[in-house]
């Protein structure tokens, strides 16, 4: 919302107070102001409020009401001028924005409707019902910038230095102050070749220098365990996201396949998209 939300709507507020409406009389089509004869309704105001950043929604109701109304009055007045000079380029942009918005409505509805107790249970069963217990690792590491530093630290630890204390004073990673502890993690959660190094270690082992995109690591494998499948509630949000993603993909595919689509783009140079002059001024 622009600086116009400093709310200069006192005159409008007074007009509204002159003929108050009870809550049951108000509908989305209730007109709250006109600009050159064009109506601004309660529905317009509610729609604008829904698009506002969160910080504006914390404003007192009266302040937000007047601010939204002022904004719509200004936009309407400016839009009326814009209607007189709208170009083909503007029309095409508005058309594509409308397409995107309407498609978004359909996909939002699809995603919301896809998540039920039944679909979540089915997704859980498909992912975990027959899953064997998986191995998990608890490790710590010391992260430094060069292989030489990592090798020197490995020699110090082999010589009796305490891994945790070295990590606190020498590691450049965010886990350093915590003694390098990374906690428990499963396969696929760590970058290669960090994961490869851990898989080949026994509890208590300290690795030699291991390079990743973050630098050079000295890794200590603290312990391992076999973890059973998580409870459904523990992965509910993860499963819901997967169900929604699949539902959206399926809806896009189905609707597109059912539509009568005739493409006539053969022979067009793909670089034509860069030629903005085609849109005109």
Image (cartoon, rainbow, N blue to C red):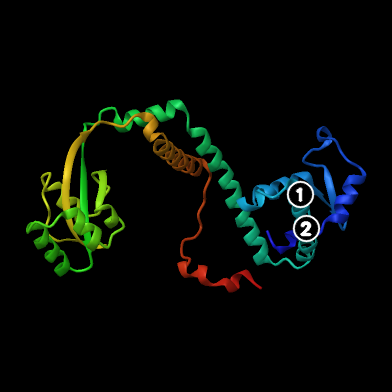
Quadrant of the rendered structure where residue 176 is?
bottom left
Q: Position of residue 244 (x, y in %)?
A: 45, 39
Q: Position of residue 233 (x, y in %)?
A: 39, 30
Q: Quadrant of the C terminus?
A: bottom right
Query: Which of the numbered marks, if any, corresponds to residue 56?
Result: none
Query: Which of the numbered marks, if any, corresponds to residue 65?
Result: 1
Identify the element where label 2 is drawn. Answer: loop
Residue 212 in sight here = no
Identify the element where label 1 is drawn. Answer: helix
Q: How many marks?
A: 2
Q: Nearer the viewer, residue 89 or 117?
A: 117
Mark 2–mark 1 Cα distance, whole angstroms, equals 9 Å
Instruction: Give the residue number, with chain letter if any, for mark 2.
Output: 7
Q: Is residue 146 left or right of residue 240?
A: left
Q: Nearer the viewer, residue 176 or 196?
A: 176
Q: Is residue 51 left or right of residue 122?
A: right
């Amino acid at each position: 919302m622009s600086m116009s939300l400093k709310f200069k709507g006192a005159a409008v507020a007074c007009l509204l107070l002159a003929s108050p409406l009870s809550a049951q009389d108000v509908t989305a089509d209730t007109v709250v102001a006109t600009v050159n004869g064009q109506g601004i309704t309660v529905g317009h105001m509610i729609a604008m409020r829904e698009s506002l950043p969160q910080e504006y929604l914390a404003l007192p109701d009266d302040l937000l009401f007047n601010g939204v109304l002022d904004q719509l009055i200004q936009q309407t007045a400016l839009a009326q001028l814009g209607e007189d000079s709208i170009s083909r380029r503007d029309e095409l942009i508005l058309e594509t924005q409308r397409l995107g918005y309407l498609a978004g409505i359909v996909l939002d509805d699809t995603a919301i409707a896809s998540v039920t107790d039944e679909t979540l249970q089915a997704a859980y069963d498909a992912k975990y019902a027959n899953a064997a217990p998986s191995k998990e690792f608890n490790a710590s590491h010391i992260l430094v910038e060069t292989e030489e530093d990592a090798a020197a630290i490995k020699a110090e630890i082999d010589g009796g230095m305490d891994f945790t204390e070295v990590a606190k004073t020498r590691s450049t990673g965010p886990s350093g102050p915590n003694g390098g502890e990374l906690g428990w993690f499963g396969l696929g959660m760590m970058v290669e070749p960090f994961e490869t190094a851990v898989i080949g270690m026994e509890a208590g082992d300290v690795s030699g220098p291991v390079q990743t995109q973050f630098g050079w690591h000295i890794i200590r494998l603290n312990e391992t365990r076999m973890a059973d499948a998580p409870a459904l509630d523990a992965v509910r949000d993860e499963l819901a996201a997967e169900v929604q993603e699949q539902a959206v993909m399926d809806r896009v595919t189905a609707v597109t396949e059912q539509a009568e689509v005739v493409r006539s783009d053969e022979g067009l140079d793909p670089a034509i998209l860069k030629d903005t002059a085609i849109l005109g001024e």
